[in-house]
Amino acid sequence: LERLDGVLASLATRLDQIAKGSREQAAGVEEALQGLKDELQREVEDRGSGVRRLEARIVEERRMVDVALVAEARAREDVAGAAEEAFRQRFSDEARKAKSTMDRIVAQVAVL
């Protein structure tokens, strides 16, 4: 009987050691899992921040392109307006020259 008590006590001690080891391992696993969760959360925040920075940069680039396009359109309108004005001026000059020539011819014909 004493021998059986000794064996049971030995088994109980062994079982307690195993249970303690299992609890320590479970605590270690939980601690590692919490560390992984924290690391994952930091990664999510970092990537989210990166995405927000990229989106802001895209918006800024788009705004700059829009400004450049508006400036280009204005420049083209200015050039077209200047060309039209130059054409009108040239046409007016040619019309005056033609009228002057016609007046001289009419005057010469009248003299004859």
Image (cartoon, rainbow, N blue to C red):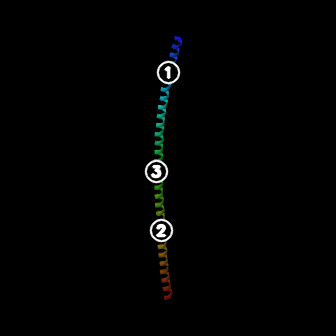
The circle drawn on residue 60 is none
Q: Is residue 53 above or below residue 70?
A: above
Task: Tell me the kind of residue under disc 3.
Answer: Ala
Name the one closer to the observer, 82 or 43: 43
Task: Tell me the kind of residue under disc 1.
Answer: Asp
Name the one closer to the observer, 50 or 22: 22
Mark 2 nearby-residue class (10 Å; few <14, some 14–19, many ≥20)? few
Task: Tell me the kind of residue under disc 2.
Answer: Gly
Q: Disc 2 marks which residue?
A: 81
CA separation in Å, label 1 and label 2: 96 Å
Name the one closer to the observer, 74 or 95: 74
Q: Could you tell which of marks 2 and 3 lies nearer the N-terminus?
A: 3
Name the one closer to the observer, 69 or 25: 25
- What residue is drawn where x is 49% and y is 33%? 33
Q: Disc 1 marks which residue?
A: 16
x, y (%) of residue 64?
A: 46, 55
Q: Disc 3 marks which residue?
A: 56
Q: Secondary structure at mark 2?
A: helix
Q: Could you tell which of marks 1 and 2 lies nearer the N-terminus?
A: 1
Q: Is residue 47 above or below residue 35?
A: below
Q: Please name which of the two marks, 2 or 3, marks the residue nearer to the observer.
A: 3
List the single residue furthest toward the front.
1
x, y (%) of residue 88?
A: 48, 73
CA separation in Å, label 2 and label 3: 37 Å
- What residue is drawn where x is 48% and y is 38%? 40
Q: Please name which of the two marks, 1 or 3, marks the residue nearer to the observer.
A: 1
- What residue is drawn where x is 48% and y is 36%? 37
Q: Could you tell which of marks 1 and 3 lies nearer the N-terminus?
A: 1
- What residue is drawn where x is 50% and y is 25%? 22
